[in-house]
Amino acid sequence: MTRRKGLFIVLEGPDKSGKSTQARLLADTLKGRGHRVLHTREPGGTSVAEGVRKVLLDPALRIAPLAELFLYEASRAQHTSEKIVPALKDGKVVISERFTMSTDAYQGVARGLGLGTTSVLNKIATSGLKPDLTILLDIPVAEFDDRDKGRALDRLERENSDFRVKVRKGYLQAAKADPRAVVLDGRLPAGDLQAKILALVGKRL
């Protein structure tokens, strides 16, 4: 992977864990402090990747696990090369909602495709790029039904609780194996969580 000058931060966690809220708060705060920031997401972040996102999250579609994995990796390859790497080379702080840890948790563990498979494809899709800091917002599976009850659920969010249990297990397993990952309690009030995230990021700026 080409040497980079910026800082790559990823917020991870199961659906409804608060990733988007905390990513936005972090991006706004860092911009207010004078940092140049790219706030992006997976799947998505580019026109091609956003098109893949529509397919992946369409609740009307049934997608085989292996096809799902390849779609995520195709989206990631485009996202990494078109947006993330150029921003890092330009010295920006990149904040992404999800990255490779999501694939390990959802497809590797919950779908049963294996971490050996996801790790190889993650490395290919990213050309070996790894986050400087991954923050996992962990919430109990029971929290899913209590949060944001009015929103329409996408294809992944419509999976059953057994699937979500596996996703959480996959996340915690992946975080334990990653020395650059930190697990935070996603049940904390948003302001408290924001303060903890800012403290973690501040040490790396």
Image: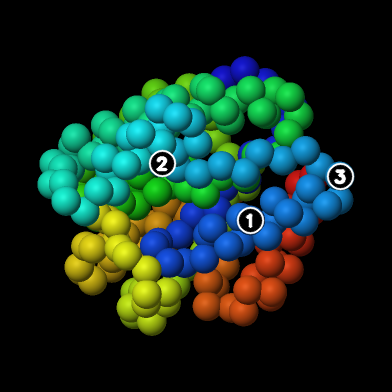
Residue projecting furthest to the right: 34
Q: How many marks?
A: 3
Residue shown at 69% from the left, 75% from the top: 192
Label 1 sits on what residue type? Arg
Per the model, the C-alpha gap separating discs 2 and 3 is: 28 Å
Are there few (<14), some (14-19), or many (20+) residues within 10 Å of tag 1? some
**Image coordinates for residue 78, horizontal then vertical, percent:** 44, 25
Colour convention: rainbow
Q: Which mark is residue 24?
A: 1
Residue beneath disc 2: 43
Q: Quadrant of residue 26?
A: bottom right
Question: Is the residue under label 1 in contact with that under label 2 (CB below 8 Å)?
Answer: no
Sequence-earlier tag: 2 or 3: 3
Q: Between residue 200 and residue 84, name the one nearer to us.
A: 84
Cα distance in 3D space between marks 2 and 1: 17 Å
Give the mark nearest the N terminus, 2 or 1.
Answer: 1
Point out residue 5 in the picture as x, y percentages from the top left corner: 74, 27
Could you tell me which quadrant the C terminus lies in?
top right
Mark 1: secondary structure: helix
The disc, 1 or 3, on the residue closer to the chain's N-terminal end is 1
Image position of 31 with respect to 38: above or below: below
Give the amino acid at mark 2.
Pro
Horizontal placement of 91 versus 116: left or right? right
